[in-house]
Image (tube, rainbow, N blue to C red):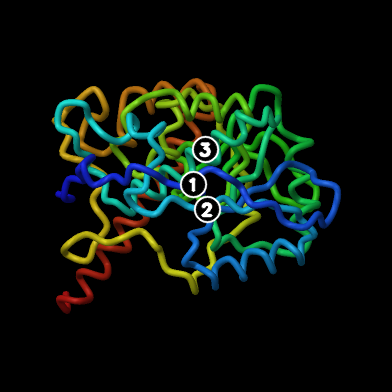
Amino acid sequence: MAPHTSIDMLPTAGPGLIEAEPAQLLRAPITSTFYINRDCDEARRAFIERNLREAGVDAERIPAVEGLAVPRSQVQFFYDDDTQSSRLSPGEIGCYASHLMAASIVVDRGLEHALILEDDAEFSPEFAQSLENILASLPAGWDLVHLSGDPSHATKPVAHLEQSGTLVRYSRVPSGTVAYLISRTGAKKFLKHSMRYWPVDTDMRQPWRFGFEIYGVVPAVIQHNERFHSTIAKGPKGERSRLRRGLPKPSRHCWTGNPLHTPQAFYFNFRTLGPLWWLKCWLRNTHRRAERMLVWQARERKSFGV
């Protein structure tokens, strides 16, 4: 279990935590774009700014929250009133708080929507055209569009994107928060007060928790640059803290301790996919699981010389 993070360790001030730093205007913006970057990560900043310039995308830098330097307005998201502690690690809190800051900027500025990037996002110079195609194809009422990471589970096609793949609904949202579009309505939903038990990339995979109308693009138009390793602090055993946060099992959050296996997840998928596509995705996912199991069994037999 990850060590608790005490609220007493929080600083009393956090200058420069919520101001976004303007970059040079490169072209008429398709949507407001922000990238999250820690002050100490200069190489990452140089990388993402070069990538943005090559794509002709104007962006603003959001100084990432450093570990426990959580803005006081966000304390209630992470710290329980009774225990005054959080089961998230300092690095996970800082990462989550940085994404909450991005959502706050969208709401405070009254932006219709925005593109949020982490500083290890990598994309082609033609990305701006892809983004324009995606925004033009989205149905009314969307909240969030996942742009990074190809799904490991079946998807339902929604619209063909010229030169950009397919707009889809997920049967399981891919992991990662490297890049996503968020609407002002989606940002408001994300900022509604609720305790955050899991890291932000896990919570983004639970759209039912926030009431998100979530979509994705296949293949992904933005990739994670593998040269940059995660900056989230690791636990005492050298591993990131687990997803299962020590909650009672079963609980109102999950059946099995896995936050992606819930009654809410089932109802959400059934509603967003529709009965026919829910069945198609279930059959495809079941087939893939069976294939993986057969491959695993074959490897086990080979390793034992059977």
Residue 42 appears at what percent x and percent y? 54, 70
Query: Does the rendering let one see residue 286?
Result: no
Which residue is labeled 3 in the image? Answer: 170
Query: Does the rendering let one see residue 34?
Result: yes
Choose top left, top right, bottom left or bottom right for residue 57. Answer: bottom right
Label 1: state its secondary structure. Answer: loop
Q: Amino acid at mark 3?
A: Tyr
Q: In terms of sequence position, does the residue under pointer 2 or pointer 3 come before the other?
A: 2
Which residue is labeled 2 in the image? Answer: 63
Residue 11 appears at what percent x and percent y? 32, 46
Dots 1, 2 in contact, CB < 8 A = yes
Q: Amino acid at mark 2?
A: Pro
Residue 215 appears at what percent x and percent y? 59, 36
- The quadrant of the image that shows the C terminus is bottom left
How far, Cα to Cα, is label 1 from label 3?
A: 34 Å
Instruction: Name the residue at 19% across, 34% down.
Output: 84
Q: Amino acid at mark 1?
A: Leu
Residue 17 numbered mark, or none: 1
**Left or right of residue 1: residue 13:** right
Instruction: Assess disc 1: are there few (<14), some (14-19) or many (≥20) residues with their C-alpha within 10 Å of its C-alpha.
Output: some
